[in-house]
Amino acid sequence: MRIDPTRPAPRAGRPSREEPRGADEVRLCEARAAQVRHRRVTVATDRALGAAGQDLDQKTGGTLSRAMKASRFTGKKEETLAILAPAGVEFDRVLLVGIGKGEDLSEAALQASAAPSSPPWTVRRDRGLRPARLPDGGTVAPDAAAAELAFGAQLRSYRFDKYRTTEKKEAKPSLKKIIVLTAEPDAAKRAYGRLEPLAESVAYTAIWCRSRPTS
């Protein structure tokens, strides 16, 4: 997470630019313009894949569908299913994330779908996030959905590890870039522009709370 070093730091301590641990860059771009090694696909209830998911399922010879049927994954909120090195594509990992029913789809639900409680991807170097075709009944526009996914992923990528002095280097997260693929990149960038300062504020607050004197 990039923190502007010219901004005033909390009085309890002046955190260095390196203290916030998170993605260095968040990008929203057209699907065809990005090259990612790890792909995240949102799935609605009853294992409903959107246009992007259906296309990926076809390219992998039905791997996504078979993996869902062979597991308990149904597309409920925050359910996840990792598929490693699927055939037919160059992705090292495809992560299916449930978003629930269309009527339950909200900004908070989209943020949560980009940031499950136990993410297996924080140690990865890049990530491709793309919303499935939004299910019927949802009230979130596609550009706003992409922005909320980016916001949720950015928040979840933050990690305060200043005092984890014994943690091995290979155990530390190495996420460098989050890429959200969308059909409306310009509108999504404008929407995310209103959320990015909030993500930075959350990081500053977390640093201040953890760095303030105890007495």
Image (cartoon, rainbow, N blue to C red):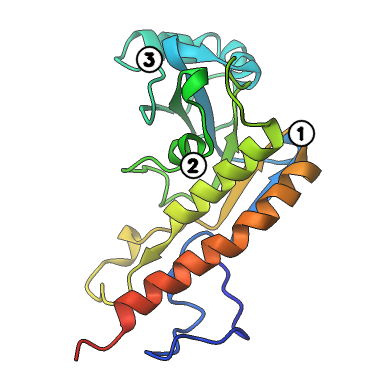
Label 3 sits on residue: 74
In the image, what residue occupies the spot 41% across and 51% down?
Answer: 122
Secondary structure found at label 2: helix
**In the rendered view, would you say 54 is above or below 28?**
above
**Residue at disc 3, secondary structure:** loop
| Image quarter (top left, top right, bottom left or bottom right) of the C terminus | bottom left
- Sequence-first tag of 3 and 2: 3
User: Which quarter of the figure has residue 134?
Assistant: top right
Earlier-in-chain disc, 3 versus 1: 1
Q: How far across and down, in percent of the image, does residue 43 sit?
A: 49, 21
In the rendered structure, the answer to whether residue 194 lies left or right of residue 16 reads right
61 lies left or right of 121: right
Q: Residue 111, labelled with which disc? A: 2
Q: Secondary structure at mark 1?
A: helix
Asked if labels 1 and 3 touch by Cβ distance under 8 angstroms, the answer is: no
Looking at the picture, which amino acid does disc 3 mark?
Thr
Judge left or right: residue 61 versus residue 67: right
Precedes in sequence: disc 2 or disc 1: 1
Q: How many marks?
A: 3
Q: Distance of mark 3 from mark 1, alpha carbons?
A: 28 Å
Q: Nearer the viewer, residue 80 or 167?
A: 80
Name the kind of residue labelled 1 in the image. Arg
Please give the residue where the numbered disc 1 appears in the rendered image: 32
Residue sitting at 66 percent across and 56 percent down? 194
